[in-house]
Amino acid sequence: MVLPSLQRTAPLGFYAKGCLAGGVAIPVDGPAWQVIHLSRNRRWGTPEMIALIERLAREAKAKDGWNGLLVGDISQPRGGPMLTGHASHQIGLDADIWLTPMPAHNMGYQEREVVPEASVLKKDMLHVDARKWTKAHARLIVRAASYPEVERVFVHPGIKKKLCDTLEGSDRSVLNKIRPIYGHHYHFHIRMKCPPGSAGCEDQVDPPADSGCGKPLTQWLDKVRPRPVVKPTKPVKVAKPKHLMLSALPDACVAVLKAPAVANMAAAEFSNGIETNAEIPVTAYAAEQPAQASLIAASDDFSLFVPDLRNIPEPEMRPAAQ
């Protein structure tokens, strides 16, 4: 589906098993952000998510020495499972922010498609690279975690270690919300709590109250350290990926999938806190037959641009479990 449903905004289900009714899009360009990978059509979220990204962009530029955000994947127009790159990002409450500041110029379409995945880690993947990591990186991540509506911020264990070693004073109060996860060394991942009144949204259990800088972090780092290569005695079977079926999602997602679309993308862009003028309520009813998750993918009519999706990075472990 290229366009969101003409419904009242509602995140439905869990971050890794759900959908999004009445999604709104962050504008491609703003005073302190630019959206990348436009061909993926993943700039959709709840109004609360989009407002938070825009707020972070403005405040980071004004107060943290960060020129502006490069905004990566949020959700598909109607949420749901993606064919590439993520297990979560399904209900409009997850967003990837690049650890590379926005350039001073306005990027063209093709430049946005090939933004480098510039890691801030050394080759050992255990420590940040002092030539790439700055205090502005730390301030940006801490600011994102400081917002009360943010549930978690996911970063690579090596970045978490750097923050544990260097944050001082009140900044340390958000360390429990900054969670280690592999793969997040060129971007970080913001996860919001379910907005108030979102009856169909399933919140994640709050993270532990402690900083997470002790034994749990050491265990994450131990998994990164090089290990002796052991040749398998038998051929290793590679498990085929299992795709979520529509029948596994909340019943209301059937209504989201079948609902009429908004008139065009411009009609669904977030602007000054105003949502789409959607009036059709979300109605839950069971799926008549299981449907492939690919039906929910953002690909139907977006064939004007055909990117190579084979090399989109996929984390080794999933934020949904953290």
Image: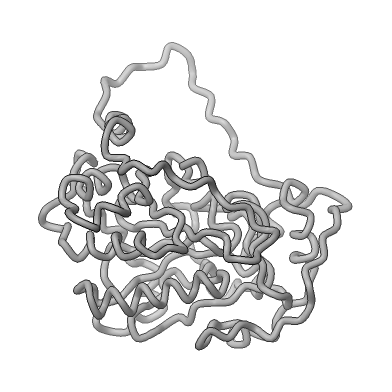
Q: Please state, as top left, top right, bottom left or bottom right, where the N terminus lies in the image.
A: bottom right
Residue at 71% across, 75% down: 8
Image-quadrant location for residue 148: bottom left
Direction from residue 127 to residue 312 in the image, left or right: right
The residue furthest right is: 288
The residue furthest top is: 233
On the image, the x and y values in percent for residue 280 come to 79, 77
- Is 191 rendered above or below residue 319? below
Residue at 27% across, 34% down: 214
Q: How many numbered dots are placed on residues in this image?
A: 0
Residue at 29% across, 60% down: 142
Q: Nearer the viewer, residue 254 or 212?
A: 212
On the image, the x and y values in percent for residue 312 come to 44, 54
Q: Nearer the viewer, residue 53 or 37?
A: 53
Direction from residue 80 to residue 292 in the image, left or right: right
On the image, the x and y values in percent for residue 107 come to 34, 80
Image-quadrant location for residue 120: bottom left
Direction from residue 316 to residue 62 in the image, left or right: left
Image-quadrant location for residue 65: bottom left
Colouring scheme applied when the structure was drawn: one colour
The residue furthest left is: 131
On the image, the x and y values in percent for residue 101 come to 26, 70
- Is 104 rendered above or below residue 236? below
